[in-house]
Amino acid sequence: MGPYSAVIDAEVPASWRPLPCPFCLMPLMGGHAECQDCSQAPPRRYVDALPPPQPLALQLLGAPTQGKSAYLQALLFLLPRLTRLWSRFAFSPATEDTRQRIERAIVAAGEGRRPEPTRSSKVKGSTTKSPSTPADASADAPAPATEVDADAPEPIDAQPSSVSARDFLMLLVYGLPLVWGTTRTLVLHDLPGAEFSRLKLEPARMPFVHRAPRCLMFFKLPDIEKQQGDAPALLMAAYVEALLACGIQLRDQSRQVIVVLTHAESARTLPASLRRYLIRDPVWATVATESSAAPHSTEFDGAHLRDYLHDMRLAHDHLRAWLSGFDAGNNFLRLAAAYGVDVRLSLVSASGAAQVTEAEFAGWQPHRILDPLLWALELDREARALAGEQPS
Amino acid sequence: MDCITDPLGFPMLWVDEVGAYVHALPVTKAQLEAAMTRRGSPFSKSDWETAQEANARVPLDALDPDTYWSAFFTGVIPGRATEFARFCGAEFRVPSADEWRCAFGALAIRPPHDAWDAMLACSSDRARALMERLAAIPVDAIRWHIGEEASLADRMFFRLGVMEWVVLSHSPMRDESERFGGLGMPAPALWPTLFDPALGTPLRSRAAVTAPHRAFGFRLFRERDKEDRWGRTPQ
């Protein structure tokens, strides 16, 4: 079954299918000016790209202070350096918001500043569909800043509104290894942690929850270690509840949750094998060199990539065994198994060091930041292979 | 093995690859105490109190795998580290980042035992007592923490020691945080990090150059005495 089989018939060859809307994953019909389902205007760079870049759509789920924003900051900080990893790699922000977020992330991580928490982009006094116009969503148009009341507390009991283009981080990525499809559109839907603190997910606000086959769930590893509460299992239950509310039957449509365990540097009881896995990160080792002009001594492809993915799977197995030693971890894993949700575990450190004070040190050193995305690409590849699709 | 001691009796090992003697350990509180008692020392009780606040002293016989880092002199700003080097002598210096990395790389592939024994042999009684107390700790700590066998660099606490100040630039036109950086992997109790000393750029910290940071310490490198015109080095 194809990854977007909920909305697109997998029997139809990929090249014949209508391009999915990057905001809601419904097929874009009758020209690409505006999605008929969510009324968003897909960015021109997305619809005009050749070949059509299949979106890798991921909903980010995580309560406040679980490391979601820090992860994104580290990922965007690392992004330009990935050109040192693959000789053909290039990226382009598909929206102006994304471009600005990349700029801010590079500066903030370079100066050692912690990220600002994700702000709500709900439109003041409106619960209607997003006001975005084609011009807003185009890559060249500046984002309207006045519509957002970033400092106002989020009214949790507000009526669910539809999605806003500003909550999406959208990147066209070129030159990936062929197995994942060399050109992809990475779409991450990021909402403020407060949206998850009530532990009731609103599918109208989170279209990828029910329409994309996988999502990222963020948990702070030291909290699990300290046996503080049962937040992981509660979020899993909320996720499954949201799926059921949308009529998704987990028996028929598999769902995969990629768990991102953050603040790994501060974990006190992590086994040596996992700490070594974190420290010996070949991606960081490759991109940590000062010069971007360094030759590509080892292309992160072929055997190197196979070794990396093999280690990533081993780390998942070790993490599963280690997490089972904590009540919260055990409950989460068993609950996922009971619901039939496939869980993959990853371990990341956004800055490479525990940060006690603001700007304690300059120059973040992100470790294993790509793992959650590599899991998503791998699971996507497996799903496409099962559907008989060839990578393009 | 070519070993000497600093003026306070703590051993230094010759590292050919760097062309310098390298302190066997990051500078310890025992060295600070010894320096404070010397006539004309620039170090006083306030330095001691700062070090205590950053990382409280533990008696020698209580140093164990859970407290060993308290033997190190941390909470040091770069200005005090260079002052300490000046106090030790004109040949002493805070190393550059390249020198530090070069020493780490060279010592990381050396077997630990012979050089350690040579350094013990040339140490003062006080230094020897401390080194004997600390000797076994990194072997177990590295195995437990990272699952690797300890090298000579590990026994010298290049990893799981302190964040060590290194010189990035000598230009007086630059800000202190651009002239000094940190290298090493500090003990997790001082500062949990995933830093690999062999990788990345040295850590720059505006906070740690102006106010004591509990993880930041240093070790000194020393040039070999100049040969006289007959090729002899002074003893």
Image: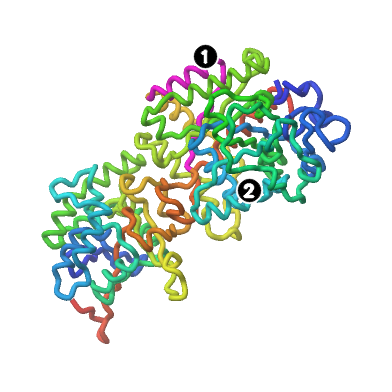
> What type is the residue that disc 2 sits on?
Arg
Q: Residue furthest right?
A: A30
N-term-proximal mark, 2 vs 1: 2
Q: Residue furthest left?
A: B125
Q: Is residue A332 above or below residue A62?
A: above
At 56% from the left and 16% from the top, the residue drawn is A340
Question: In the rendered image of this protein, does residue B10 appear above or below residue A238?
Answer: below
Secondary structure at numbered mark 1: helix
Queried whether the magenta region covers residue A117, the answer comes back as no
Considering the numbered disc 2 on the image, is that residue within a helix, a strand or a loop? Answer: helix
Q: Same chain for the residues at labels 2 and 1, yes or no?
A: yes
Q: Is A58 displayed left or right of B175 in the figure?
A: right
Residue A129 placement: quadrant = top right
Residue type at numbered disc 1: Ala
- Please give the residue where the numbered disc 2 appears in the rendered image: A101
Residue drawn at 77 percent across, 42 percent down: A43
Residue in view at x 62 percent, y 15 percent = A250
Q: Chain of mark 1?
A: A
Q: Disc 2 and disc 1: Cα gap in Å? A: 38 Å
Q: Nearer the viewer, mark 2 or mark 1?
A: 2
* Residue positioned 25% across, 60% down in the render: B27
Query: In the image, which residues are magenta?
Result: A326-349
Q: Is residue B157 visible?
A: yes
Q: Position of residue B18 (x, y in %)?
A: 36, 67
Q: Which residue is mark 1?
A: A338
Residue B49, quarter of picture: bottom left
Q: Quadrant of the N terminus of chain A?
A: top right
- The chain identifier of the residue carrying mark 2 reads A
Color encoding of the figure:
rainbow
